């Protein structure tokens, strides 16, 4: 079949050329025709088989090279006037035959190649047609199965409604019949085509998984368009680009003032507690290890500065020094609060937080906007900075690093004892009292406002005493 | 966190570094009543510590800065007063 189609679809030029060439060869090969043409008078009109006509046909249809035509004309001349050089004309005729045979062989090979190509194309099309037929059959079976299932569901719903109405009318509650397993087996027993349809269903489902979902019309209708996605993407930026602040400026100022008030009250209460406990102990000064004193001085100088440490260590213990201790506590709290509020994320490692801060300052100061495709504004726009801040929010960072809270707790446990604390201040001031133990007994939520992970670390049973003290003194 | 929320203005909680010169324009002296004013208003003295934090807002790439709440500081010379 393929061969027939390939020959039918082959260009007609080849066939006509083939026929013409055969005619030419037969006409030229018979010496009688040549003799007839030779015997005709010179003034007589030449028939269609004259050499010039043959040449024209060959040039027009067969496209034989000109060198062959030259050979052919020379051969014709040798036929026209028999001369002693007839042996040479025979040899040229043989050569012409050989060349013709070679040309035929080349064309035959070309036609065979073309035939093979067309056969392969035809096989591929047959396979595609077979696949499409298979898919059509599966889809039809699937559709029939869906229609059957829908009909069964509608029938079941109708039966349930009818039973419910009957129960209401009879005032006797009867449960609606539900298709049980035995019923389905019975149905399958009375309807054997269902079992065959189940196998077809499984094959259809497997084939459906093989096919893409875009082939079904329902999925095409449910697919969101590009415009919907674009609009949804732009709507996601409304969170960042809104002009409405959750807090007003006066609320922010009031919050800072409340924070200062809390700092003052906490420092005052802690200092008062410190001196109250001291008064209850009768003003006795315990002996302090010189190493502890040097360490306390070092830590206090690191956090509060050398001048304040010098004032605390040189001032005599009096009622005025309690004011200095309170100021030291306030300064410590201010430093911690400043550092905490300046960070992008509480508990984030310092080096990464410094990197975020550098990027933030660069955005603020450079005036060049960072490449955000939908925010064609300069970085001076606070919205873009707010977007960056939100991107570096604790939630986002926590999504990137879920272990950040554990890192925060371990970091506080590790660096907490080195922070300036009430114990160090009192040690520098010349006293060591059970202030730390008194605060350890209190609940962290009541004494200070520290993050929940820190509270958990304080209350964790596996935490040692020093670590608890460190966390508590972090304030 | 001042950097964790989206606001139309950038707020920043500020505190004064230890050893910085006192500037009445940007900070408040806690014991201001003990200073007579004039040449002895505390300007140019060293800051001992910060007792209350301040609030500053800036916009326009940090060009427009405004101090909404000035931080309260203690000067080194106040030790002689106490």
Image: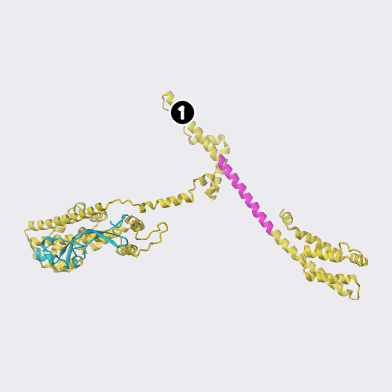
Furthest residue toward top: A170
Residue bearing mark 1: A163
Indicate whether residue A125 is drawn in magenta: yes
Nearer to us in this view, A317 or B22 = B22
List x then y, in percent, for residue A426: 13, 62
List x then y, in percent, for residue A170: 43, 23
- Who's the residue at 73% across and 58% down the image? A11
- Who's the residue at 50% across and 34% down the image? A154
A210 horizontally vs B22: left or right: right
Chain in cyan colour: B
* Span shown in magenta: A117-144
Give the answer, above or below, for where A233 lies relative to A184: below
List x then y, in percent, for residue B53: 21, 59
Nearer to us in this view, A464 or A352 = A352
State the SS at label 1.
helix
Indicate whether residue A363 is drawn in magenta: no
Helix, strand or loop: magenta stretch: helix
- Who's the residue at 47% across and 50% down the image? A227
A190 horizontally vs A175: left or right: right
- Who's the residue at 64% across and 54% down the image? A124
- If the image is split into quadrants, where does the N terminus of chain B sit? bottom left
- If the image is split into quadrants, where does the C terminus of chain B sit? bottom left
Q: In the figure, residue A387 lies in which quadrant?
A: bottom left
Chain under label 1?
A: A
Q: In the figure, residue A370 lies in which quadrant?
A: bottom left
Question: Does residue A409 show up?
Answer: no
Query: What's the colour scheme?
Result: by chain
Q: Colour of chain A?
A: yellow
List x then y, in percent, for residue B66: 25, 59
């Amino acid at each position: 079949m393929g061969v027939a189609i390939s020959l039918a679809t082959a260009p007609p030029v080849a066939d006509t050329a083939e026929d013409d060439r055969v005619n030419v060869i037969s006409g030229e090969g018979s010496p009688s025709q040549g003799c007839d043409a030779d015997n005709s008078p010179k003034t007589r009109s030449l028939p269609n088989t004259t050499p010039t006509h043959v040449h024209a046909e060959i040039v027009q249809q067969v496209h034989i090279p000109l060198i062959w035509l030259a050979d052919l004309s020379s051969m014709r001349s040798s036929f026209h006037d028999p001369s002693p050089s007839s042996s040479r004309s025979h040899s040229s005729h043989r050569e012409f035959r050989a060349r013709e045979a070679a040309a035929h062989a080349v064309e035959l090979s070309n036609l065979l190649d073309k035939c093979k190509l067309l056969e392969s194309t035809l096989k591929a099309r047959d396979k595609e047609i077979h696949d499409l037929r298979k898919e059509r059959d599966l889809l039809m079976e699937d559709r029939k199965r869906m229609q059957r299932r829908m009909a069964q569901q509608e029938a079941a719903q109708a039966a349930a409604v009818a039973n419910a109405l009957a129960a209401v009318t009879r005032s006797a509650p009867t449960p609606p019949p539900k298709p049980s397993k035995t019923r389905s087996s019975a149905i399958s027993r009375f309807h054997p085509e269902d079992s065959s349809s189940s196998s077809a269903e499984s094959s259809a489902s497997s084939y459906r998984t093989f096919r893409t979902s875009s082939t079904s019309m329902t999925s095409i209708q449910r697919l969101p368009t590009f415009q919907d996605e674009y609009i949804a993407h732009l709507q996601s930026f409304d969170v960042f680009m809104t002009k409405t602040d959750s807090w007003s400026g006066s609320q922010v100022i009031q919050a800072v003032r409340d924070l200062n008030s809390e700092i003052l009250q906490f420092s005052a209460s802690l200092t008062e507690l410190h001196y109250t406990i001291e008064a209850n102990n009768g003003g006795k000064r315990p002996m302090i290890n010189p190493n502890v004193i040097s360490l306390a001085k070092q830590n206090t100088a690191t956090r509060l500065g050398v001048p304040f440490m010098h004032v605390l260590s040189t001032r005599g213990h009096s009622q005025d020094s309690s004011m200095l201790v309170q100021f030291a506590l306030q300064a410590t709290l201010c430093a911690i609060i400043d550092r905490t509020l300046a960070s992008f994320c509480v508990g984030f490692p310092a080096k990464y937080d410094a990197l975020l801060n550098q990027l933030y300052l660069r955005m603020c100061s450079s005036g060049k906007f960072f490449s955000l495709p939908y925010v064609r504004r300069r970085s001076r726009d606070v919205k873009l900075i707010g977007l960056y801040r939100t991107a570096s929010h604790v939630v986002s960072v926590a999504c990137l690093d879920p272990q950040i809270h554990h890192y925060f707790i371990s970091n506080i446990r590790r660096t907490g004892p080195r922070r300036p604390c009430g114990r160090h201040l009192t040690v520098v001031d010349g006293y060591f009292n059970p202030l730390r133990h008194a605060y350890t007994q209190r609940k962290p939520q009541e004494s200070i406002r520290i993050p929940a992970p820190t509270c958990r670390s304080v209350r964790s049973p596996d935490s040692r005493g020093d670590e608890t003290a460190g966390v508590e003194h972090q304030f | 966190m001042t950097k964790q929320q989206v606001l139309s203005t950038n707020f920043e909680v500020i505190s004064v570094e230890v050893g910085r010169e006192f500037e009445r324009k940007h900070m408040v002296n806690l014991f201001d009543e003990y200073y007579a004013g004039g040449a002895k208003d505390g300007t140019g003295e060293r800051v001992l510590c910060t007792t209350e934090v301040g609030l500053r807002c800036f916009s326009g790439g940090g060009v427009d800065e405004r101090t909404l709440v000035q931080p309260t500081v203690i000067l080194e010379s106040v030790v002689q007063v106490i």
